Image (spheres, rainbow, N blue to C red):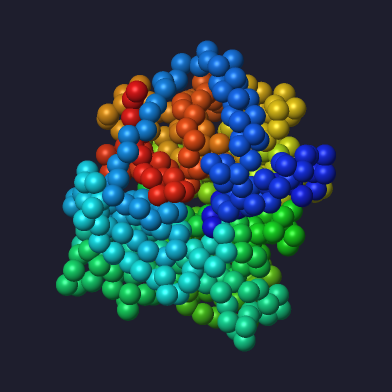
Amino acid sequence: MFVARSLPDNHRDESAECAALHRQNIFCRNRAPWPNVFPRMKSLLLLAALSLGLTAGAQPLPQITLKPVLTQLTDERPVWLSEAPDGTGRFFVVYQAGKILVVKKGSDGSHAKVFFDITDREPNFDNEDGLLSIAFHPGFATNHLFYVYYNQKNPDDQHTQPLNFPYRSVISEFKVSATNADQADLTSERILLQVQQPFGNHKGGELLFGPDGYLYLGLGDGGAADDPFNSGQNVATLLAKMLRIDVNTRTAHAFGDSHRVLEYGIPRDNPFVHEPNMGERGARREIYALGLRNPWRYSFDRDTGDLWIGDVGQDLWEEVDLGVKGGNYGWNVREGAHHFKPGPPGAQYLEPVMEYTHRENLRAEGLYPDHSLGLCVIGGYVYRGKSFPALNGIYIYGDYNLGTIWGFRYDRAAAKVTAHGQLLQQPDNLCSFAEDADGEVYALMQDGKIFQLTAP
């Protein structure tokens, strides 16, 4: 479905047991769900993670616990949760299969209603696609507009040329029903953008309005392994990028000798707006940043406006990046802060703020050798809630496979991490974090459980 990841078919020195575990994961590509496959492998990695957590225990970070919420919701694979910005106290829970439930915040979820349902469009046909997020227009309280990201198969007779890609990602605007505030009007769909996709994985897929009012979208490199189309460093494609568009305007756009009006506007300060018009071969002006393998969950710090990105690695390294306009994060020349493929001599890439490795024998080569192990990063939030003051200012992130939840403090003036460590080790496969209107943070698990992060 989402956190696209390929653990390494090219590392033949791994055990057959580990290789099999890599191949079977349904979320992070080629990794098996930990709770029911290869308990010995899971135990070994968990022991390593726990021992590292103890040895790195000097960091002044609080421990957390998880409080079950919305306990009557039973569907699997909740991948996103968002509170409507209209003061109604409603949570909208997105399920990968194509459904969004609306439920009262603070309830047990027993009176949930179906707000949005496109399961008949079959958006979830592989492991990392599906319906992946919802974003509410900043003016939702009055205009009732919202945006969703989902995936589709291209009909056999409608594949795009010359690459004939079989899939597409769709970003659409919808409106709430005029007669029922808890139901979407599916007939109101306005497709803003469709991005052709070569493979079924690495879809990124979060929609997020920034402090500037623009809509941000992170896309993966299109899938498979090793970025076979070299999308990461190619600014003529939207894949492997963070995009930024204006949903409130329309831009007349020249593509070579043809002209068309886009269903969105392009912000005038996007990095490539002044590049020459070369049609489909030229730099895409929607691009905000590049060199991302599969950005799975990113967020703006509500106090500072900083954009934090969890980018899923491939063979060896996971990373968290500080998103900046025009930033190049290195994929596929680099994985984390490390060499991956040859690139132009002297090219400059932004270093990760945090990284961790999949392998015990590589920890010493990482930016933070005392960071515990993991396999698939889940980006999170800088905590700005009121219920847990000791957590204030800590960026929270986790690992899908091991279920570990970590945190770090970042000094913006010094541009460095001042403390980091493990906040909690728990057994569930972690799909996503979420944040409510009060700044409280939640964890969504693959089996359908939803938790609020709280003090022990």
Q: Quadrant of the C terminus?
A: top left
- Judged left or right of residue 423, residue 294 is right
Query: Residue 453, located in which quarter of the rendered image?
Result: top left
Percent across and percent down for residue 354 are 58, 32
Q: Give the residue drawn at x 63%, y 25%.
A: 48
Q: How many marks?
A: 0
- Above/below status of 95 relative to 251: above
Left or right of 254 in this view: 75: left
Residue drawn at x 47%, y 77% as measured from the top left: 261
Horizontal arrangement in the rendering, residue 388 relative to residue 30 (left or right): left
Residue 434 seen anywhere in this rendered image of the structure: no
The residue closer to the viewer here, 151 or 279, is: 151
Q: Quadrant of the N terminus?
A: bottom right
The residue positioned 36% from the left and 44% from the top of the image is 450
In this rendering, position of residue 409 left or right of residue 274: left
Q: Could you tell me if residue 123 is visible in this image? A: yes
